[in-house]
Image (tube, helix red, strand yellow):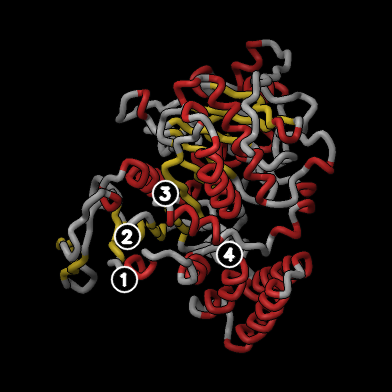
Amino acid sequence: MAPPLPAFVVLFAVIVPLSAAALVFPKEALPTKSGYLPIPPANASLFFAFYEATHPLTPPASTPLLLWLQGGPGCSGLLGNFFELGPYLVSPDAETLTPNPFAWNRRFGLLFIDSPLGTGFSAAPSPADIPTNQSVVAAHILAALQSFFALDPSLRARPFFLTGESYAGKYIPAAGAHILDVNPTLPEALRVNLRGVAIGNGLTHPVAQVATHADSAYFTGLVDARQKRELEALQAEAVALTRAERWREAADARGRVLSRLQNMTGLATLYDAARQRPYQTDPVAAFLNRAEAKAALGARGDVAWEECSDAVGAAMHADVMKSVRPGVESLLRRRTRVLLYQGIRDLRDGVVSTEAWLAEVDWDGLRAFLDAERAVWRTRGGDGELAGYVQRSGALSHVVVYGAGHLVPADNGRAAQEMIEGWVLEAGLFGRRVPNGRRRRLNAAPGGRRALVKHVGI
């Protein structure tokens, strides 16, 4: 059954002098709406922040809405907001906010939710209330969306897209399929107008993905043949435990693969092979735990914000190696648009791991997709820097983002913004009709030769 529509939306506030809050959040950086969205199935609420589009290309009633979900499991959506794609990013000094020229709310309304329960400012009433599987997470997301749309019923008719990265590669297919399953049981006035889902560097079908790390590292020169064989043995153990449905042991085995790969390569982080230091996200936590920031956002003052919750991670440990590939298949079969994108430098959930599970998708459009031309993508304006590669057919699009690791919007904001805008609005390489075989000359390749490749800007 569908979760009941809540009668009210809870908004918490912390009493702080307005002048102090204004120093942290200038007026233009405040969310359009923020606070807590009741999720009646759990008798609890999820924290949200919503930013209306600043420069939409469409009338308000048809301006798309995007929901961003972070990974983890248990990492806060506010990390995406203030470190990756929101309108203002936390400065390295942890004291101020800086405008983000590549924000995703330029053309679209942008909603962030701290999910699952227990994540970020979404405090769980008790540890027992933290979800342990995707079915519960999906039901909570839909309940939160119903609460959000109750704030302003005009929002409901707008085209809606689920987006996110990393472990949201599970949340998004599960929630998307759940929404489509529930919609027919609801009055038309209460349905969610889901048009598509976008997953960045996602963990979606782990049994196929965990088997790719040795090849990814070996063919980029990060491990030798002996090390590759050692990794393959560890991967085989993780695969065998997954197929035996020994879920916790399988998750532990995957952890051993990644830990050994980290030790072998000496990389600062597997999330981005080019980085000399891990992503510097600590300023976000320092900023969001200030009383003034909590007051400006309408967050509970008694909740300490954590980038990622160990409690949620522990609760969902047995979920790590479970697949949501059927959710992706369900979306594609119902012609819901799916975008899969990865930063090319990610060694955890990167390009190779995505292509491995894509090849196993049970969908009648798969052969046409695999046979589709892979187009070179360059950014708009100037000389057009290489942004990556785009392959698409029917409802499915796959984008490889150049110059990026696991957190694509943080690493290559311009490309990420052009990608999401092009995909949602079906423009450029994502246009409804891109002539097959059409080729354009690009600038001279190294050595003076001219390159003949298909090239349409997003």
Label 4 residue SS: loop
What residue did someone put label 1 on?
371
CB contact under 8 Å: marks 2 and 1? yes
- Amino acid type at mark 1: Asp
Give the x, y percent position of residue 28: 49, 20
Helix, strand or loop at mark 3: loop
Residue 205: numbered disc? 4
Q: Place residue 448 in its image quadrant.
A: bottom left
Rate crowding at label 4 as few (under 14), some (14 to 19) or many (20 or more) other CA atoms within 10 Å: many
**Structural distance between the alpha carbons of marks 2 and 1:** 9 Å
Q: CA distance from mark 4 to mark 2?
A: 21 Å
Kind of residue sitting beneath label 2: Ser
First of labels 1, 3 by sequence position: 3
* Amino acid type, label 4: His
Q: Which residue is mark 2?
A: 393
Relative to 35, say whether 336 is above or below: below
Proximity of marks 4 and 3: CB atoms separated by less than 8 Å: no
Q: Residue at x 23, y 47 (%)?
A: 382
Q: Is residue 147 above or below residue 159?
A: above
The residue beneath circle 3 is 336
Which amino acid type corresponds to the residue marked 3 in the rendered image? Thr
Rounded to the nearest whole Å, what is the CA distance between mark 1 and mark 4?
22 Å
In the rendered image, is residue 321 in sight? yes
Between the residue at mark 1 and the residue at mark 3, the CA separation in whole angstroms equals 20 Å
Dot 2, crowdedness within 10 Å: few (<14), some or many (≥20)? some
Question: What is the count of numbered marks?
Answer: 4
Query: Residue 180's x, y, as percent?
Result: 51, 44
- Between the C-alphas of marks 4 and 3, the distance is 19 Å
Q: Quadrant of residue 8?
A: top right
Instruction: Tell me: 108 left or right of 27.
Output: left
